[in-house]
Amino acid sequence: MTGHGKIAMITGAGSGIGRAAALAMMKEGYSVVLAGRRQDALDETVKLGASSHVPTLAVSTDLGDPKAVAELFAKTKERFGRLDVLFNNAGSNAPPINLEDLTFEQWQTVLNANLTSAFLCTQEAFRIMKDQDPRGGRIINNGSISSQTPRPNSAPYTATKHAITGLTKSTALDGRKYDIACGQIDIGNAATDMTSKMNSGVLQADLQIRAEPTMNVAYVAQSVVYMASLPLDANVLTLTVMATKMPLVGRG
């Protein structure tokens, strides 16, 4: 198991991709810190992974609040003494309405959940990873295929995911001096509660409603485990994993 003796933190670990990644990391032998908004959902993830028999820490927190994020990482360091992997996965979306009808509050909510949270967690991870022994670690950002190409009526989500690409590259560059690697996984149509509407049809670039293929979220989790398993002198800077027949190539 590649994770034996290593500590991983997963944000948004109470559902969907975050839960799948957390369970996969547990199975691989990592001790896992699970962060998210709902304690009951995080506890359920821990329960689902109990057969892996690894130490866990579930922390309900506001990942857009600098003080709350600092407390999360302080608890992690106090419990485990170090951090080897951070998966910045937490996020949210705005309603799929016309751009001009979005409220500032809807914009700000998505910005905080998708971008500010990743930046704050990255900062705190740097502060731990650069001083620990052995030094360094790995940060993996959930970029989404919306970091490459937008869907209709998705300005807040698409803008933040494009920004995640910039954060990933800056983190990869600035982390070199500390032996911190950073990469991004762009995910397309993993089957979760968030993508359940794909089966009934979603708006396309030609303004038609069509159903889209999905894929098992376990394939995403396996990809995250692979990225995390590499030695720190190797890095997957970008990885796209998607339902084979989804309309990404040629979208628009």
Image (cartoon, grey):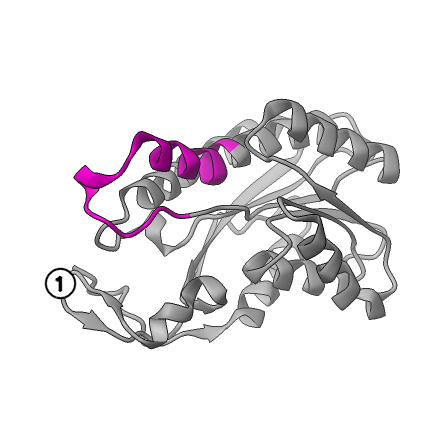
Q: Which residue is mark 1?
A: 207
Residue under the point 87% across and 38% down: 79
Residue farthest to the left, as pictured: 206
Q: Position of residue 134 (x, y in %)?
A: 81, 36
Is residue 183 covered in magenta? no
Instruction: Choose top left, top right, bottom left or bottom right for residue 151.
Output: bottom left
Q: Position of residue 141 (x, y in %)?
A: 52, 45
Instruction: Choose top left, top right, bottom left or bottom right for residue 212.
Output: bottom left
Q: Quadrant of the N terminus?
A: bottom right
Left or right of 130: which side holds 160?
left
Residue under the point 71% across and 54% down: 40
Is residue 107 covered in magenta? yes
Indicate the secondary structure of the residue bearing disc 1: loop
Left or right of 3: which side holds 61?
left
Residue under the point 62% across and 44% down: 37
For the question of whether residue 178 can be seen, the reply is no
Q: Residues within 10 Å of mark 1 (few under 14, many from 20)?
A: few
For the question of whether residue 155 can be seen, the reply is yes
Look at the image and give the residue range highlighted in magenta: 93-116
